[in-house]
Amino acid sequence: MTQLTEPPAQPAVSLVVQSAVALLATKLALKTIGFPRTLRLIDRRVPAVRPFDAARQRALSHAFAAAVPIAAAFLPGRMRCLEQSLALQYLLRRQGVESTFVLGVTPFRFEAHAWVECAGEPLNESGELIRKLLPMRINAEEH
């Protein structure tokens, strides 16, 4: 079996299906139990992160980061950055990829945005947008 070193151009159908299920579950959890409990649930339900080499971790993170917005486009309703980022965090942690869920805010005219980082690199957002935000890396144990 060959290891991926570069992210695929198009994610596999199985990744899109997994992403769709994670998005629907995330949206339901946010509506029924709220943000703090959803974040704790993701942290509790996902096994401890397994060590991967950097190339495999990067390939998996980019593959899922590409699959989540594709799945979101096919689902009913609107999946915003919060739902997409929480679903991506769940999918990555389930695969053993160490990632960080981040909320960013602007201090004056209030705006908020969510994204996921892997090895300090934003996965589901451009660096240009998040440079305008004050990031808050969220740890589920604190909520």
Image (cartoon, rainbow, N blue to C red):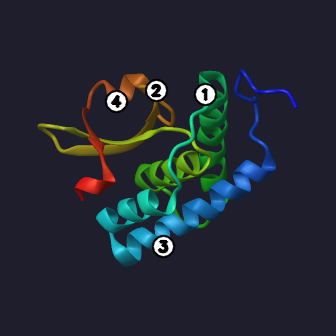
Regarding mark 1 in the picture, which secondary structure is present there?
helix
Label 3 with label 4: CB-CB less than 8 Å: no
User: Dot 2 corresponds to which residue?
Assistant: 119
Residue visible at 54% across and 68% down in the picture = 25
Quadrant of the rendered image containing residue 18? bottom right
* First in sequence: mark 3 vs mark 2: 3
Neighbour tally class for label 4: few under 14, some 14-19, many 20 plus, Cα within 10 Å: some
Question: What is the number of the mark on residue 58?
Answer: 1
User: Dot 4 corresponds to which residue?
Assistant: 130
Question: What is the number of the mark on residue 28?
Answer: 3
Quadrant of the rendered image containing residue 17? bottom right
Regarding mark 2 in the picture, which secondary structure is present there?
loop
Residue 88 in percent (x, y) is at 53, 48
Regarding mark 4 in the picture, which secondary structure is present there?
helix
How many numbered discs sit on the rendered protein?
4
The residue sitting at the bottom extreme is 32
* First in sequence: mark 2 vs mark 4: 2
* First in sequence: mark 4 vs mark 1: 1
